[in-house]
Amino acid sequence: MDPHDAFKQEVDRNVRSLAADTDLQALSRIWVREVAPHRWPYNFRWMDRPAIQFPTDAWAMQELVWAVRPDLIIETGIAHGGSLVFSASMLALLDMADAVERGETLDPRQSHRCVLGIDIDIRPHNRVAIEAHPMSSRIRMIQGSSVAPEIVAQVQSIAAGYGRVMVCLDSNHTHDHVLAELQAYAPLTSVGSYCVVFDTLLDDMPAALSVDRPWGPGNSPKSAVHAWLGTHPEFEINRDIQHKLLLTVAPDGYLRRTR
């Protein structure tokens, strides 16, 4: 057997073993629950911009970007811009790899790849920092509600100019808002690509952790995902990702478009 195939089979066995270890899965949820009051995801940066995510999910995202090789990544929720910068840097690496394969010199000014961020309130200090960042040439931002008809229409118009599209939803976490985002943006996901819904873990956490928020268990990104999937068989949950990560903000949130 080819050694690369042999290693992949070993990894597949590892992931199945992790999925079957219910004690370990439960322990991981306990760890996430206990670290939540400490706002652990706030402690990490990507290329000097705060990226409020679990590092494990960032690793999963770079694997998906490399596999899908998107031309456009759509992200709802900008905050400090770390996720936008992360996605832009992943797209830059794709361009670099493509140039090497073609034996060409990379010219970033000619890149078509882009990350598009939408947020209802892009704070001025964050906008300034993002626009001054070395990755800014690959970033576009739209201010407005991600579910407002005029914003959705603008994003759809932009996406029409791209071949392979990936979507990441990480703004308002209420059931109704995420369901509306899924209805608006998931159809833009290319076949074989992903619509990733973040913070689905809220459904698995104690309600007390969301006491000061308009969302919580039963009114969360995960409840929206399951409601939406009931009428969208063209998407499926890739649970292998959450099983191998163990620590993730997106259980049942990695949605692969199959057709």
Image: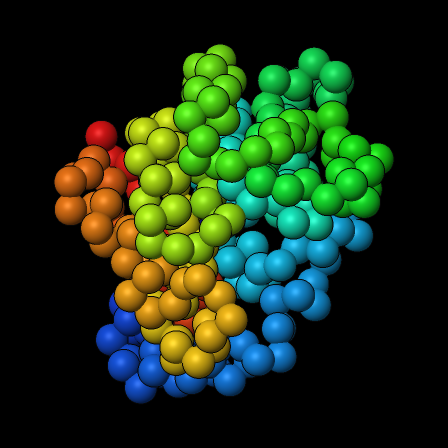
Left or right of 255, for residue 72: right
Residue at horizontal 39 percent and vertical 80 percent from the top: 206
| Residue 212: % across, % down | 51, 71
| Residue 177: % across, % down | 39, 46
Give residue 244's quadrant in the image: bottom left
Vertical position of residue 197 compared to residue 133: above or below: below
Give residue 87's quadrant in the image: top right
Q: Nearer the viewer, residue 249 or 93?
A: 249
| Residue 163: % across, % down | 44, 18
Q: Nearer the viewer, residue 211 or 83?
A: 211
| Residue 241: % across, % down | 38, 58
Q: Nearer the viewer, residue 211 or 250?
A: 211
Residue at horizontal 81 percent and vertical 45 percent from the top: 125
Residue at horizontal 70 percent and vertical 14 percent from the top: 110
Report whether residue 178 is seen.
yes
Left or right of 230, for residue 217: right
Left or right of 192, for residue 100: right
Vertical position of residue 52 compared to residue 148: above or below: below
Q: Nearer the viewer, residue 159 or 46?
A: 159
* Position of the C terminus by quadrant: top left
Left or right of 170, for residue 190: left
Report whether residue 242 is seen.
no
How many discs mark residues in the rendered view? 0
